[in-house]
Image: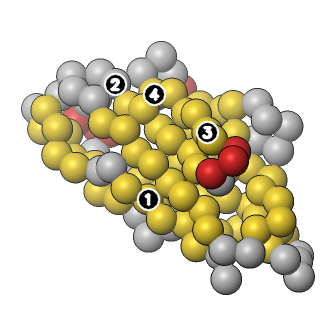
Amino acid sequence: QVQLVESGGGLVQAGGSLRLSCVASGRIFNINDMGWYRQTPGKQRELVAVFTSGASTNYADSVKGRFTISRDNAKNTVYLQMNSLKPEDTGVYYCSAEILALGGPYARYWGQGTQVTVSS
């Protein structure tokens, strides 16, 4: 079985920083894409930042210049460094990845989510 486990959420004042981590574990053969999504109050879940299958990165316009996604392939881990946080960044942040587990096929996996709250 494959699991994604996020950590690093919390409460921070506007202008502050947080670093999220997500570790994929299990019988993983290959990870196609991996990144972060968020569910903010009153909105649908949206992409925040992701490593694509081509190893490039995509960011939501609202976080460009403030958030940075990075990864450690050896540890099947992806990070999200969030700087200059704003109250509108408040929400539940989910890690997601398209993973080929041993025995296949590729499937989309989601973590349980981690709460980020930015106070004004």
State how far apart marks 4 and 2 are (Cα): 6 Å
Instruction: State the SS at label 3.
Output: strand
Report the side of 110 relative to 32 (left or right): left
Q: Residues within 10 Å of mark 3 (few under 14, many from 20)?
A: some
State how far apart marks 3 and 1 are (Cα): 13 Å
Q: Kindly identify which residue carries mark 2.
A: 83
Residue under the image location 84 percent in, 77 percent down: 102
Q: Kindly identify which residue carries mark 1.
A: 6
> Which amino acid does the dot numbered 3 rest on?
Arg
Q: Position of residue 98 (x, y in %)?
A: 74, 61
Disc number at residue 71? 3
State how far apart marks 1 and 4 are (Cα): 17 Å
Q: Are marks 4 and 2 in contact (CB under 8 Å)?
A: yes
- Assign the N terminus to one quadrant of the image: bottom right
Q: Residues within 10 Å of mark 4 (few under 14, many from 20)?
A: many
Residue found at the far front of this picture: 74
Pick whichever of labels 4 and 2 is earlier in the sequence: 4
Observer-side mark, 3 or 2, equals: 3
Q: Kindly identify which residue carries mark 4.
A: 67
Q: Residues within 10 Å of mark 2 (few under 14, many from 20)?
A: some
Which residue is nearer to you in this view: 76 or 108? 76
> Which amino acid does the dot numbered 1 rest on?
Glu
